[in-house]
Amino acid sequence: MSTLDQTILDQLETQAIELPSWAFGNSGTRFKVFSTPGTPRDPFEKISDAAQVHRLTGLAPTVALHIPWDMCDFDELRRHAENEGVSLGTVNSNTFQDDDYKFGALTHEDAAVRRKAIDHHLACIDVMHRTGSRDLKIWLAEGSNYPGQADMRGRQDRLHESLQEIYAGLGDEQRLVLEYKFFEPAFYHTDVPDWGTSYAQVSALGGKALVCLDTGHHAPGTNIEFIVMQLLRLGKLGSFDFNSRFYADDDLIVGAADPFQLFRILFEVVRGGGLNNPDVQFMLDQCHNVENKILGQIRSVLNVQEMTARALSVDVGALREAQVSGDVLAANQIFMDAFQTDVRPALAAWREGRGLPADPMRAFLDSGYQERIEAERVGGQQAGWGA
């Protein structure tokens, strides 16, 4: 059985991965949203499902909200979360499901539409005050489909002005994190398509504005770990949205498509001081279209933990010596040895030592929780995209 050095176990002790409330709702393809038995019907049931992940793994103490999908009495929701053993986390805005935003929201030519979008974000900040949330995360589905359709420079200017007003509305301990995505739903140009654009916009705002990196939001072949390194180096990496992709923004279980990429990313997180750094929020952003949603989230947080343990296993002293001496093959072998280390038995023992099940997936299946919610959650409107 493989073992992990105590220093590695100590660094894993406080690792926390935020869960997205929407991962527990119904989702699907562009053509169909699939319903499944036991799906939550309101934010309270989403929180209860998310709490199961934390109870079984000890890795997911907070749950992100999406507004307006999770609109409710937030004082009650906060108490409900505390009773379930979790807290409310990042608040995500939504300016991509309203007819007024067809041609943009914070970048729109019409000042009235921009006003509506800005006010939505200020309302999200009010939600943050009530939930105790620190981060406001903004993803903008804005851009154009055809050359000449839009004034790209003008849209950047309007985006800056809109973000300035939102930023000014933040509380002293609150932050703005700006996500980027290289395409979809716009295909010719996207207003925030890459880390450089996000970095330029947040740098112009101030120290409480940072970049959110979604691991599925890059062109094929992009060296994502280089971007992670650079943003950590610049002190502007605010959060991760962990998921996995084969073709585009697939939002699959993190590590499913390319576990080696996840390892490489987490190595740079460790190298750059981002592990257990309160300024860097780890979060999942996934959809579970065909698999059980709670099990999908359990598998995801375990994947992140496993690859973190492997990244911590790299012999950095030997690696640096090989790098300095120009020993290419030795350096690569040291890296690969850590990646190929099976840390699962050691992590199972680590969980048992903390009163957690050695196998959280099996523990959930044996708990009867899924059967209970399928029997109880009959009637009402299931939560999903847009609800």
Image (spheres, rainbow, N blue to C red):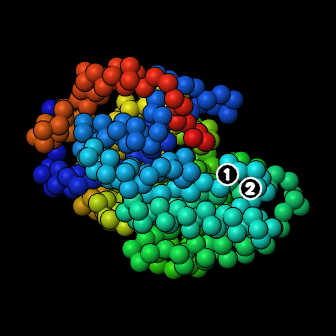
Query: Residue 14: horizontal and vertical position, in percent?
Result: 23, 55
- Which is more toward the observer, 255 or 361? 361
- Which is more toward the observer, 128 or 343? 128
Residue 364 lies left or right of residue 135; in this view the side is left
Mark 1 in CB contact with mark 2 (< 8 angstroms): yes
Residue 248 lies left or right of residue 146; in this view the side is left
Rendered position, 45 above or below 190? above
Q: Quadrant of residue 255?
A: top left
Instruction: Identify the element where label 2 is drawn.
Output: helix
Residue 4 lies left or right of residue 57; in this view the side is left
Residue lying at the far left of the rendered structure: 353
Q: Quadrant of residue 134?
A: bottom left
- Which is more toward the observer, 240 or 38? 38
Rendered position, 125 above or below 56? below
**What residue sits right under mark 1 in the picture?**
96
Residue drawn at the location 38% of the way across and 56% of the way down: 75
**What residue sits right under mark 2 in the picture?**
101
Is any part of residue 202 visible from this angle? yes
Circle 2: residue type: Tyr
Residue drawn at the location 54% of the way across and 79% of the way down: 168
